[in-house]
Image: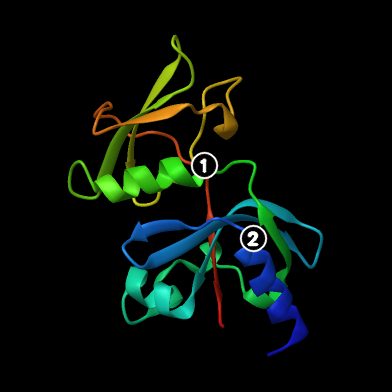
Amino acid sequence: MPKESMNLLRELEAIEPSEFEPGTRIYPCSALLNDGTVLECVYFVSADTAKRLFGPAGIEAVSERLRIPVEQVANVGVSPARLPARFANQIYQAGETHYGCYMFTLVFSRWRREKYSQGGFIDFLSFPRGRRPCDVKEVLLRTGPIRASRVKEYRWCVYSG
């Protein structure tokens, strides 16, 4: 295995994964690309996980605009935009509220709560002004509005190993 691949795997080991489905680990990360670009919202998945998520086509089923070749990644790290893994995993574990949709409320303080209705993946959310992922105190499951929430745009990167 090339040295670059070993470094990437080591860096991913330092990231607490989300478990989208039992046995399906996704790594919401920040990525530094070889050209110096920093992307705060990138899901790293193994080739096997990509096939579980997207079917036999794997990552090829995802729009090319949303894919990053692993060869372009210099480093990965903790994303400052990521919902803490313990809360994301609580939401995933509870399952969809409606077909293809998770409804939940993030509690920031006694006075500040934000409701979300989100389809697909929930690790990268838009937070209320002045609030960050580290400010989340609790998640209330199966609550929320019918309207969709804003999600940060994210990309996908498949690694082997």
| Residue 129, horizontal then vertical, whole percent | 57, 20
| Residue 125, horizontal then vertical, whole percent | 48, 38
Of 149 and 124, nearer the camera is 124
Label 2 amino acid?
Ala
User: Among all residues in the image, which is located at the extreme right?
Assistant: 36
Q: Quadrant of residue 97?
A: top left
In the image, residue 111 sits, relative to residue 25, either above or below, namely above
In the image, residue 150 sits, relative to residue 1, either above or below, namely above
Q: Which residue is mark 2?
A: 14
Q: Residue at x 32, y 82 (%)?
A: 56
Q: Tell me if residue 6 can be seen.
A: yes
In the image, 135: left or right of 102? right
Mark 1 → mark 2, Cα distance in angstroms: 14 Å
Number of other residues with Cα within 10 Å of mark 1, as a class: few under 14, some 14 to 19, many 20 or more = many
| Label 1 close to label 2 by CB (< 8 Å) | no
Of 64 and 36, nearer the camera is 36
Residue 18 numbered tag: none
Q: Which residue is mark 1?
A: 84
Q: Residue at x 53, y 53 (%)?
A: 154
In the image, residue 78 sits, relative to residue 132, either above or below, namely below
| Residue 49, horizontal then vertical, whole percent | 41, 73
Rendering colour mode: rainbow
Which comes sooner in the sequence, label 1 or label 2? 2
Which secondary structure lies at badge 1?
Answer: loop
Q: Tell me if residue 119 can be seen.
A: no
Number of other residues with Cα within 10 Å of mark 2, as a class: few under 14, some 14 to 19, many 20 or more = few
User: Among all residues in the image, which is located at the extreme top?
Assistant: 111
In the image, residue 105 sits, relative to residue 21, either above or below, namely above
Which secondary structure lies at badge 2?
Answer: loop
